[in-house]
Amino acid sequence: MPRIHYPALLLCGLLLAGIASADDRPPPPADGDMPPPQGQPHEGHQPPPEAFAACGGKHPGDKVVIQLHGQSIPARCVDFHGKLAARPDQPPPQQ
């Protein structure tokens, strides 16, 4: 009769469970999270004044349009360190 190696069986089960629940997509940002644009460090990143002005009197999740550099940019208001700021719906193009 073959002998069962319980530690190896447990390890295989855990590995299979991990593979089955793996997801290639990164988790979505938490509500109010405002990650830095690609290519810019998180430390010290501050939205421009126009982002705060666009959300004056608004609520989190409200749709707004930011006027930046002569462009109209669709955005949503999100919490940024206790103040509402407009976060663009699409990341800015890479330069």
Image (cartoon, rainbow, N blue to C red):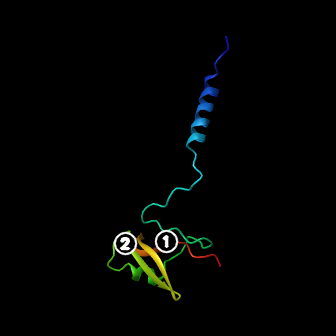
* Apparent side of residue 39 relative to residue 33 in the rendered image (left or right): right
Q: Could you tell me the amino acid type at mark 2? A: Asp
Question: What residue is drawn where x is 67% and y is 14%?
Answer: 2
What percent of the width, then of the height, locates residue 90?
53, 72
Compare residues 73 and 54 and report the one nearer the observer: 73
Q: Is residue 5 left or right of residue 56?
A: right
**Quadrant of the image occupied by residue 12:** top right
> Eyeballing the image, is 27 above or below 90?
above
Secondary-structure class at tag 2 = loop
Identity of the residue furthest to the bottom in this view: 70
Q: Quadrant of the C terminus?
A: bottom right
The kind of residue on which mark 1 rests is Asp
Return the mark for residue 62.
2
Residue shown at the point (38%, 68%) measured from the top left: 61
Front position in the image: 64 or 36: 64
Who's the residue at 56% across and 70% down the image? Answer: 42
Above or below for 21 versus 2 = below
Q: Earlier in the sequence, mark 1 or mark 2?
A: 2
Label 2 neighbour load within 10 Å: few <14, some 14-19, many 20+: few
Front-lying residue, 94 or 6: 94
Dots 1 and 2: beta carbons under 8 Å?
A: no
Disc 1 is placed on an element classified as: loop
Q: Which residue is mark 1?
A: 89
